[in-house]
Amino acid sequence: MVERKGAGFRAVVIAASAGGLNALREVLGGLPPAYPLPILVVQHLGPSAGSDFADLLNELCPPQVKEAEEGELARPGVVYVAPANYHLLVEKDGRLALSTDPAVNYARPSADVLFESAADAFKAGLIGIVLTGANNDGSAGLKRVKEQGGFTVVQDPNEAEFDAMPCSALEAAAPDRVLPLGRIAAFLREVSDSSGQPSLRRADRGRR
């Protein structure tokens, strides 16, 4: 059991691009249905994509997976996927917002937009994770998560289907952990103790 002093974690944000379906299926598929944190996901999708991506993950993974909706409060045990062609943001009160502002890093939704707003909302209560992808989206956002006291994780680029996003995040953010894909779900389970309260010992930062 790992321990962390303070209020504990409040949310998880995950970024994925090319190769993201397989990566997210493994990470989310390894979590229990009642995982005690909300999980917010940006997967780069074409602007005309419908809700099929979220629906597919919902069929494959134990936690509920749905498209994020404007103004809803992020709830524990639910995975919120940014809709195609919308940025997903977190307001200060934990409610979700959607935006059609211009693309960031050639992407809408953009991981940087989600990560930066979530870091400002949840501060040290946030876990940020960057997975496989073919660009540098998520790097600046992961750096913001770390600057605000959150915990940062990057998929090991050596085994990522596309290593550009993990490599860029490694360089930009010096993450707390670099993990193979198969260890990320176990890590997320590990930071929740038997009472369902997220925890992490500060001494665990930097362990690989």
Image (cartoon, rainbow, N blue to C red):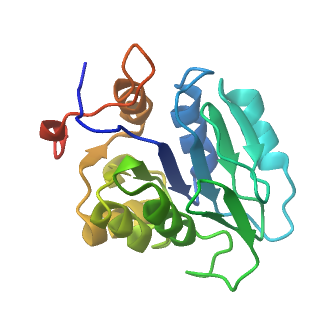
In the displayed structure, would residue 124 be above or below residue 141? above
Q: Nearer the viewer, residue 189 or 117?
A: 117
Quarter of the N terminus within the rendering: top left
Looking at the rendering, which quadrant does residue 157 occupy?
bottom left
Residue 153 location, x and y as percent? 34, 49
- Report the residue at 78% width, 64% height from top: 84
Looking at the rendering, which quadrant does residue 6 occupy?
top left
Q: Residue furthest left?
A: 203
In the displayed structure, would residue 55 be above or below residue 173? above
149 on left or right of 50 = left
Q: Residue furthest top?
A: 194
Residue 76 location, x and y as percent? 60, 34
139 on left or right of 46 = left
Residue 90 location, x and y as percent? 60, 61
- Report the residue at 72% width, 37% height from top: 65
24 on left or right of 84 = left
The image shows a total of numbered marks equal to 0
Looking at the rendering, which quadrant does residue 96 occupy?
bottom right
Residue 166 location, x and y as percent? 38, 60
- Report the residue at 43% width, 51% height from top: 129
In the displayed structure, would residue 11 be above or below residue 170? above
Quarter of the C terminus within the rendering: top left
